[in-house]
Amino acid sequence: MKKVNNLALRQQIFRDELRTLCINKEWYTLGNIKQYDNLFDRLSRDMDDTEIIGVCIDIYDHTDVEQFAQEYGVSYEEVFDNIVYEVYELVHTFVER
């Protein structure tokens, strides 16, 4: 939890939103059910940036990156950058006193 003045900032990704994103983007197609469940087990009520990037790496590692790179004419790094961008769009920040 990040502290700013007298406020605590908590970051969270909701399971159903991440699941929908993975389905819509056709991510995590190389993972099995146990690996997919482990991805969601990584989500917590209070995630720091290291944990969020860990989720992004997990998605990248279980996605057919070569297909995306070829389809969109981008590098593997750009595929990863897109995953990071899209996942961070799901991050909810809550302010607590």
Image (cartoon, grey):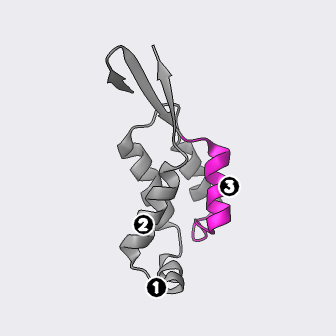
Q: Which residues are magenta?
A: 13-32
Quarter of the image holding residue 34? bottom right
Lower position in the chain sequence, tag 1 or tag 3: 3
Q: Which mark is residue 20?
A: 3
Which quadrant would the N terminus be assigned to in this image? top left
- Mark 1 — residue? 73
| CB under 8 Å between discs 1 and 2 | no
Q: Which mark is residue 80?
A: 2
- The answer to whether residue 92 is above or below residue 9 is below
Question: At which x and y percent is residue 73?
Answer: 46, 85
Residue type, numbered disc 3: Thr
Name the residue located 61 percent from the left edge and 51 percent from the top edge. 18
Question: At which x and y percent is residue 13?
Answer: 55, 41
Q: Tag 2's secondary structure?
A: helix
Q: Nearer the observer, disc 1 or disc 3?
A: 1
Q: Which mark is residue 26?
A: none
Mark 1–mark 2 Cα distance, whole angstroms, equals 14 Å
Name the residue located 42 percent from the left edge and 66 percent from the top edge. 80
Q: Tag 3's secondary structure?
A: helix
- Crowding around mark 2 (Cα neighbors within 10 Å: few <14, some 14 to 19, many 20+) is some
Residue type, numbered disc 1: Gly
- The answer to whether residue 77 is above or below residue 5 is below
